[in-house]
Image (cartoon, rainbow, N blue to C red):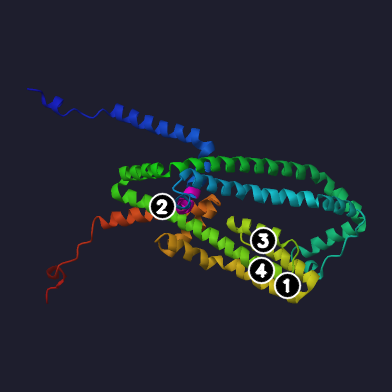
């Protein structure tokens, strides 16, 4: 007979520790290698999940050809990059001559006096007034002489900005490539994610994965539809107030709304321009449109997201706002997903152990 010690061998602690360390090192190495592609991969996953119903609809309309439907959506994604860049470059080239003439005309332009409301400010009014009087005494040439030492910094900032734009374009192209792969093999990727979630947390994990996809789709619908609504309201106000370059300003409003910065960054300067050129009446009309466009997202976006994902409104708001503060634009999508997964897992964990109702005998108190 085998001794008792051989029947129940003690666990090999060294082997278990080394196995855990090896798995951890493998996971860390994988993340480190994938780090340059993580941003593009996350954006591609969000785009594909959000537009998957559109892909299926196109596939049904295009004789069941997945390749044709994928090609159409990829062309749309490329146009999202090409059209704004073309408009920006065209506007820059078109107005470059005006900018150069304006910069040269600054040398002969007299320095205007400060408005009274600015000089009467309690903290900065006196300092601003003294600085402005000194600049007025020296004339435009003196002001330009003081500004010239900062031109190197401005050029360096401009170079970094161009470099950032180049990196953004590269990330966008990489995102488009990953989107094409996911569109083609979407069902396989979805099965893999659901199988992995089921392996981690059983049916609760699979349910959380499905709800995460619904949350991404709901947030995307809420963000996009809200941005379009804000752009339409802002564009209508710009047209009514006869503001020049309305299409370009409306495009800027759309970009700012998609980036969750709001339309007021464009509309407030437009209101100020209308006030000085057309009077307070038209400025008031445009201000009404600006305020409506700037506040409509507070209730329209949560309603649209709620329709896409059956989650509490408070959970959605906390996920969107907290994710945006912590992770930027991408956090708008990641925040609700994380809270949705946590919410589902917590619900299932609580429901797995139902609370036992007290019996009538235990509730009844003995009479004194």
> In this rendering, does residue 68 appear at all?
yes
The residue to which callout 1 is attached is 283
Q: Residue 248: x percent and y percent?
A: 70, 58
Query: Which residue is pictured at 72% across the width and 68% down the height?
Result: 271
Mark 4 or 1 closer to N-term?
A: 4
| Mark 3 element type | helix
Q: Is residue 99 magenta?
A: no
Of 217 and 11, nearer the camera is 217
Q: In the picture provided, is 209 more to the left or to the right than 143? A: left
Query: Which residue is pictured at 39% across the width and 33% down the height?
Result: 24
Q: Residue 175: x percent and y percent?
A: 54, 42
**Residue contact between numbered discs 2 and 4, judged by CB atoms under 8 Å:** no
The residue to which callout 2 is attached is 212
**Residue contact between numbered discs 4 and 1, judged by CB atoms under 8 Å:** no
Image quadrant holding the N terminus, namely top left
| Distance from Cα at disc 4 to Cα at disc 1 | 14 Å
Q: Is residue 52 magenta?
A: yes
The residue to which callout 3 is attached is 250
| Distance from Cα at disc 1 to Cα at disc 2 | 44 Å
**Residue contact between numbered discs 1 and 3, judged by CB atoms under 8 Å:** no
Mark 1 or 3 closer to N-term?
A: 3
| Distance from Cα at disc 3 to Cα at disc 4 | 9 Å
> In this rendering, does residue 121 appear at all?
no
Mark 2 or 3 closer to N-term?
A: 2
């Amino acid at each position: 007979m085998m001794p008792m010690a051989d029947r129940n061998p003690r666990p090999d602690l060294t082997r278990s520790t080394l196995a855990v360390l090896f798995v951890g090192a493998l996971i860390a190495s994988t993340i480190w290698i994938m780090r340059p592609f993580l941003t593009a991969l996350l954006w591609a996953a969000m785009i594909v999940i959000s537009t998957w119903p559109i892909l299926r609809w196109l596939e049904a309309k295009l004789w069941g050809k997945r390749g044709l439907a994928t090609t159409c959506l990829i062309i749309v994604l490329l146009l999202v990059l090409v059209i704004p860049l073309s408009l920006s470059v065209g506007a820059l080239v078109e107005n470059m001559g005006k900018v150069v003439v304006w910069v040269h005309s600054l040398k002969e332009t007299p320095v205007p006096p400060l408005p009274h409301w600015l000089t009467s400010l309690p903290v900065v009014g006196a300092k601003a007034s003294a600085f402005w009087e000194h600049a007025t005494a020296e004339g435009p040439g003196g002001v330009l002489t003081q500004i010239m030492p900062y031109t190197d910094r401005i050029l360096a900032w401009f170079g970094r900005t161009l470099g950032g734009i180049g990196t953004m374009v590269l990330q966008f192209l990489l995102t488009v490539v990953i989107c094409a792969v996911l569109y083609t093999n979407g069902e396989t990727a979805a099965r893999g994610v659901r199988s992995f979630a089921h392996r981690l947390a059983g049916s609760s994990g699979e349910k959380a994965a499905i709800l995460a996809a619904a949350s991404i789709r709901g947030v995307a619908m809420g963000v996009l539809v809200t941005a379009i609504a804000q752009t339409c309201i802002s564009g209508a106000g710009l047209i009514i107030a006869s503001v020049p370059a309305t299409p370009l300003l409306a495009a800027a409003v759309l970009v700012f709304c998609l980036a969750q910065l709001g339309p007021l960054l464009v509309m407030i300067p437009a209101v100020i321009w209308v006030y000085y050129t057309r009077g307070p009446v038209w400025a008031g009309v445009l201000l009404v449109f600006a305020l409506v466009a700037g506040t409509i997202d507070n209730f329209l976006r949560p309603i649209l997201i709620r329709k896409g994902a059956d989650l509490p409104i408070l959970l959605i708001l906390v996920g969107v706002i907290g994710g945006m503060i912590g992770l930027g634009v991408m956090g708008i999508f990641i925040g609700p997903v994380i809270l949705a997964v946590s919410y589902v897992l917590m619900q299932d964990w609580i429901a797995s152990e139902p609370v036992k109702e007290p019996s009538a005998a235990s509730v009844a108190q003995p009479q004194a």
